[in-house]
Image: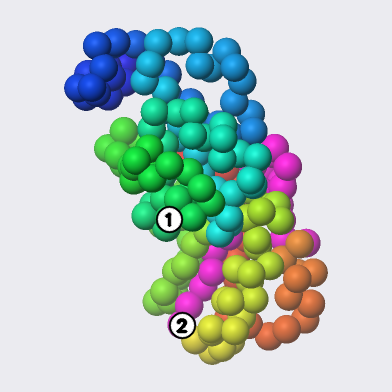
Amino acid sequence: DAFIQEVRKSFSDTDVVGGTIIHLAPNCVLPKHFQNPRPHILVSVWETSRLPIAWVPIINRFDQVWCATAWQRAVYASSGVDERRLFVVPFALDPALYVADGEGLSDIKRGGCVVLGSVFQWTERKNPRALLNAFVKAFRPDDKVVLVLKGYEGDDPACSVDSHVKTLLDGRTHAPIQVVSRLLS
């Protein structure tokens, strides 16, 4: 598409117009991904403070690595990825591209509360335990705040994680937490 073509044109240090942009975990990158002409760009997100050591040589094969945040860039650099390859390219969303045709987060009853939200697949790597513990520690039950979790388990975005939340909270009192398991616009 036009965006990809502009990205490819932006490499002034190469005469090759082709190239690949790979959005995978580094351990999923295959030799065939490097068969196309350069530049080779890796778009990969990692949520912990250290990369698996086996990933570093794979990542260093790419001409550029696009990190979503400066924090992620620092993690990659401190893990041994060549800093010259690392670029912060924030993820973006153009809301004008989406038409609201159903219930969205703005339809959730807030009652004058500050709404905090998180959207994620329920896995240990996403660390939902830390999120819930931090929320319970930071806010009292009478604080005007609600945590909205659009979380799902496995590959099914409609699969509720409500039972996981209840298990982790284990009867502790806390500010309101709302789990959303239905599809949103």
Q: Residue drawn at (59%, 17%), measured in percent from left and top?
A: 31
Type of amino acid at the residue the image marks with label 1: Ala
Give the magenta-colored segment's residue range.
144-163
Of circles 1 and 2, which is in front?
A: 1
Q: Residue drawn at (61%, 20%), measured in percent from left and top?
A: 30
Quadrant of the frame with the N terminus: top left
- Asked whether, in this view, residue 6 is left or right of residue 183, the answer is left
- The residue that label 2 is drawn on is 144
Query: Is residue 66 among what the camera can see?
Result: no
- The residue that label 1 is drawn on is 74
Which structural element holds mark 1?
helix
User: x%, y% of residue 73?
Assistant: 41, 50
Between the C-alphas of marks 1 and 2, the distance is 35 Å
Determine whether 117 is above or below 181 in the image.
below
Q: Quadrant of residue 141?
A: bottom right
Determine whether 86 is above or below 179 in the image.
above
Determine whether 16 is above or below 55 in the image.
above
User: x%, y% of residue 68?
Assistant: 40, 46
User: x%, y% of residue 35?
Assistant: 50, 10
Mark 1 is surrounded, within 10 Å at the Cα level, by few (under 14), some (14 to 19) or many (20 or more) other residues, namely some
Mark 2 is surrounded, within 10 Å at the Cα level, by few (under 14), some (14 to 19) or many (20 or more) other residues, namely some
Instruction: State the residue in front, 139 or 109.
Output: 139
Instruction: State the residue in front, 112 or 83.
Output: 83
Kindly identify which numbered label has been placed on residue 50: none
Which structural element holds mark 2?
loop
